[in-house]
Amino acid sequence: MKPDYDVVIVGAGPGGSAAARRCARSGLKTLLIEKERFPRYKPCGGCLSLKTVHLLDLDLSPVIENTVFGAKFSYCLKEPFHIELRDPIAFLVMRDRFDQFLKEKALEEGAEMLEGEKVVKVQEKDKGVEIELASGERFNSHYLIGADGAESIVARSISLSPHGNDGNGIAIQSEISFDSSIPFPEKELHLIHLDFGGIPNGYSWVFPKKDWLSIGIGGMFRETKKMNPRQYLKGFLKSLTYVPEGKTEIMRGHLLPSFHDEWQKVSQGRMLLVGDAAHLMDPLQGEGIYYAIRSGMLAAEAIIESKEKGIPPSDLYQKTIHLHISENLKWALSFSRFVFRFPKLAYQTLKRYPELSDLYLQVLEGRETYQGFVSGVKRRIRDFMKGRLSEKIRRAMAKA
């Protein structure tokens, strides 16, 4: 049977839309399938690093909510310090508008789209992939890209859901209507606020946008049954003096997919996973948008090369993901375990040596690797402790 499409992409978030845009531009007949109808609300901080903006190479001004020039750091909302630069370090967006924008860019390149249709099963056949919808309708495609999030149907269908890891994390975010009733500090309007120490294995944040304050908590909670993340968020909101009691308007959560191994499987035969579906997320600070877009583009490139050479794209994609994403994230993973085990020490070191913050900003820009950043932090911790490291800290640093 002749396939209906060259490529079918499940999920129209940033990773799916980026893949669809690239595939369609190269002349591949491309279909995006999305279970929701756009625009739709997506719980997410919506912080775009500079390397994300450079990667997209699009005029994002129609969807930018705020330009970020620095960050405020605190520990349990105490001991704050600021880092501010002359040039932007990031941009803030609302995911409903941002995702709609990227979807439209994919359609402009010639991709087709089905909205409000849920994929329930995918299966690789001799010469392609069969995709089944909840309605019973079926499509056939040469290739399939799974961009359908942390609870990916595609990953489960082909047994590529990661095993043997620390488990998924959880993020919960509240959107506060940003109006004159909010006495938000004017000097912090173009800063993101990151607070450590109050959340086990995670952190809290405040991102000021045009009409909303996005306030949330997130972490890799290993024992979620013994804790209530919503209570942590409520406690954080209550501690913010500029948030009036009862002001919360939206509070929603989502899973944070755990990156767990530099060689974790992200593909099989003609089926490739991107973004959250592939568990490609920064384990230190939870950034997922960049890795979704980057892996979406890499998946498209692997399919284009596969079609040209007549070989399965799986091995091509696995190698490029390792080279461009996973080899770097393994350093973020090991360091995150150290930071979450000794949050006060990590915070005090960051505060004592501001150059570390500059180094981390270079990681976000793509000018520095996590390996370089982690090496710099280790040196400063030894300086800060004057060499008097406990055996626990010494062992943890060796693993980081």
Image (cartoon, grey):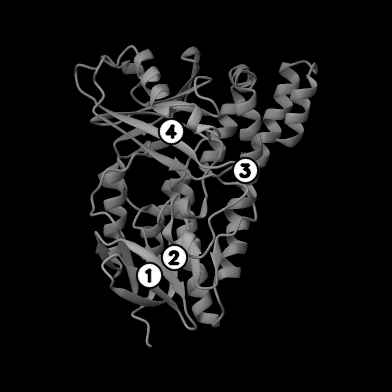
Q: Residue at x 61, y 18 (%)?
A: 344
Q: CA distance from mark 3 to mark 1?
A: 33 Å
Q: Which residue is mark 3?
A: 369
Residue type indicated by callout 4: Asp
Q: How many marks?
A: 4
Residue 21's tag is: none
Where, quadrant-wise, is the C terminus in this rendering?
Answer: top right
Q: Secondary structure at mark 1?
A: strand
Up/down of 301 relative to 282, above or below: below
Which residue lies at the image location 59% right of the left edge and 33% below the top edge?
A: 359
Where is mark 1, residue-wise? 8
Mark 3 is surrounded, within 10 Å at the Cα level, by few (under 14), some (14 to 19) or many (20 or more) other residues, namely some
Give the x, y percent position of residue 28: 38, 76
Mark nearer the viewer, 4 or 1: 1
SS at mark 4 in the image:
loop
Q: Mark 3 or mark 4, which is nearer to you? A: 3
- Disc 2 residue type? Ile
Identify the residue under disc 4: 87
Spatial separation of the CA atoms under disc 3 and disc 4: 21 Å
- Which SS class for mark 2? strand
> Of callouts 3 and 1, which one flags the residue occurring earlier in the amino acid sequence?
1
Q: Nearer the viewer, residue 140 or 335?
A: 140
Q: Check disc 1 and give the amino acid type.
A: Val
**Alpha carbon of mark 3 to alpha carbon of mark 2: how far?**
28 Å
Please state the horizontal and vertical placement of residue 242, each as a whole percent of the image. 30, 14
Residue 48 visible in rendering = no
Mark 3 touches mark 4? (CB < 8 Å): no
Q: Which mark is residue 145?
A: 2
The answer to whether the residue labelled 4 contacts the one labelled 2, judged by CB atoms less than 8 Å apart, is no
